[in-house]
Image: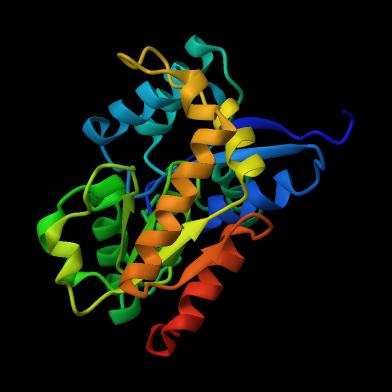
Amino acid sequence: MENRKSFFHLHLISDSTGETLISAGRAASAQFRNAMAIEHVYPLIRNKRQLMPVLQSIDEKPGIVLYTIVDQELADHVDQRCRDIGVPVVNLLEPVLATFQAYLGARSLRRVGAQHALNADYFRRIEALNFAMDHDDGQMPESYDEADVVIIGISRTSKTPTSIYLANRGVKTANIPIVPGVALPESLLVATKPLIVGLIATTDRISQVRENRELGATTGFDRSHYTDRANINEELKYARSLCARHQWPVIDVTRRSIEETAAAIVALRPKLR
């Protein structure tokens, strides 16, 4: 029992691509052997309208909040809301900026994304991030043929974090849930451009992650069915048969980090490198 992992929500809010936060969050999480972060990445948050649903998500799934937002008003809003909710929050940039200002004797420019050169690669990554957010969890199926990669898989196979990770590297990625009895969009089946990849994991792994998922007051949700190993076995069997029928490659993510899964996907399509 001592080796059983506990799970916690890790919210990463950025006014840019979120790479700094992802690296810092994972570096810290790696120091805690029996704890695993369920990452929620919110890139390109630059105004209150974009921030409101993020704060609502934190309220619904409390956990650690890390952010890099240079706009002081927005940063103050995050701090205050997290205090109200009662969750720990860290502004990763502020102590670093304060040190630089004290040593250099000058105020920072407070310019969003100043570390990124405004070149073709930067805009490619921003476009890919926007695409990944627009096409998360089966959204906007009409434009799947614009994707570089489409990730499919049953619930809790790391589709969204893998999509965001790939997008941060300029790979336009969509993800679609596989649900037994629910047909995949026709637009995916006729798409010719994207690499379509199925993600799977062991039954035990998926059940464990699902048991630690907080689903709020989802109407009609049956937790026992969702975490039942027999049902998960059937979901995985269906996912494998679907991928085999269409000759889509399958990656087992059970013992892979998000980075390793992304690298395996890129290796399947060399031109993504």
Please tell me which residue lies in front, 161 or 130.
Answer: 161
x, y percent for residue 14:
42, 46
Q: Measured along the vertical axis of the image, is residue 51 above or below residue 30?
A: above
Q: Is residue 210 left or right of residue 246?
A: right
* 71 relative position to 130: left or right: right
Location of residue 141 by image quarter: bottom left
Q: Nearer the viewer, residue 87 or 7?
A: 7
Name, please, the residue furthest toward the right.
2
For the question of whether residue 212 can be seen, the reply is no
The quadrant holding residue 230 is top right
Residue at 24% in and 43% down: 182
Residue 161, given in percent of the width and then of the height, sits at 47, 51
The residue depicted at 25 percent of the width and 65 percent of the height is 127
Q: Is residue 80 left or right of residue 10?
A: left
Which residue: 87% across, 28% down?
Answer: 1
Q: Is residue 194 above or below residue 252?
A: below
Horizontal and vertical percent position of residue 186: 13, 60
At x 29% / y 49%, what residue is drawn? 136
Query: In the picture shown, does residue 67 fall above or below 79?
Result: below
Residue most extreme to the bottom:
271
